Amino acid sequence: MTGKGSPSGPVARHHAPGMTPPIPWEERPPDSSDVLWRSSRNPIVTAAAVPEANSVFNSAVVAFEDGFAGVFRVDDRGRRMRLHAGHSADGFAWQIEPEPIAFEPVDGRVAEIAGQLEFAYDPRLTWLEDRYYLTWCNGYHGPTIGLAWTQDFRHFVQLENALLPFNRNGVLFPRRINGRYALLSRPSDPGHTPFGDIFYSESPDLIHWGRHRHVMSPVPLSWQSTKVGAGPVPIETSEGWLLLYHGVLTSCNGFVYSMGAALLDLDEPWRVIARSSSYLLAPAASYERVGDVPNVVFPCAALVDPATDRIAIYYGGADTVVCLAFGQLSEVIDAARR
Ligand code: BMA
């Protein structure tokens, strides 16, 4: 058991070289003993950040230059699902581009699928080797895993979709594993999907994906009984890959989305070392319980500072706003084991 402020061994940083902005942070409230606590500034992004937006929620954030950059899920007032780039000096206050990202196809084959962009949502950002990769839920005859890269958050080069429809929650690992790129995803249906397991796939070139392995299933009679899906990019620790994920239960009133943690083997990430039996964050604040889709906590990004053992997690609240939660990394790792 590791204590507050004592990291569970070294944590590999996977971000652009030379970039070490202090991550957003607030101390744990004195009356809280929870593993994760909410920002007092929640929600940190609302529809007001983008002209003509209906909602801004499940969004990705990374360290970029001397601050932070992100890709934001923006549903417009036609209820079209779009992705917008954004920037922040401190990770709390965001300037979001008013126009959606215009993806540039890497070649003529990708142009065939880019022209059919129906929707784009639930982004994740991964610093991998020399650039930021974006994965998202891309419309191509139903939902599947879109893939693009950027180095400046102005130009986004679209690659082939990683997988066949129907699939969601595609999350790239931040380095190659045994020489191959690695991806988590959750095969789905074209609708609201009353099932869902997390799978692992690998690729030599980010185009051809295979050697699919099952990672984890829902747990009957629990907060994660209906489906589970990967959240932020897995965090490399000496204890294994720390995977924050969403788990869903079906109540009399519909789905309830909460956040949990798991540890995956560093070399064979389809092997689950540990998994939290209780959720770490569930809808409780008004901005998580009330919105376009009530009772949703949907994590898509995490910033880690190994030197201070701090983690800041970005999550969507009730499919309406972007929120932040904080914790001590070592305590989150401990919670994954309980
Ligand atoms: C999932 C995704 C998420 C959303 C969640 C709750 O299927 O569409 O974007 O937050 O449902 O509505």
Image (spheres, rainbow, N blue to C red):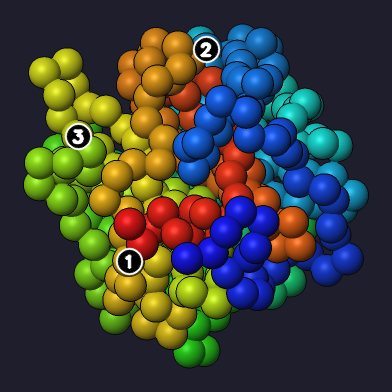
Figure quadrant of residue 12? bottom right
307 relative position to 2: left or right: right
Tag 1–tag 2 contact (CB < 8 Å): no
* Whether residue 265 is situated above or below residue 317 in the rendered picture: below
Q: Amino acid at mark 1?
A: Ala
Q: Secondary structure at mark 2?
A: strand
Which numbered dot is residue 170?
A: none
Tell me which residue sits at (85%, 59%) in the image: 19
Look at the numbered disc 3 and give the secondary structure of its residue.
strand
Residue highlighted by disc 1: 274
Pointer 3 residue: 249
Measured as percent of width and height from the top left, residue 331 is found at 52, 54
User: Marks 3/2: CA distance?
Assistant: 26 Å
Give the quadrant of the C terminus: bottom left
Q: Earlier in the sequence, mark 1 or mark 3?
A: 3
Give, as a three-letter code, the residue at label 3.
Leu
Residue 128, percent across and down?
Answer: 64, 69
Give how far across and how far down residue 1 sits, in percent: 47, 65
Residue identified by numbered label 2 = 54
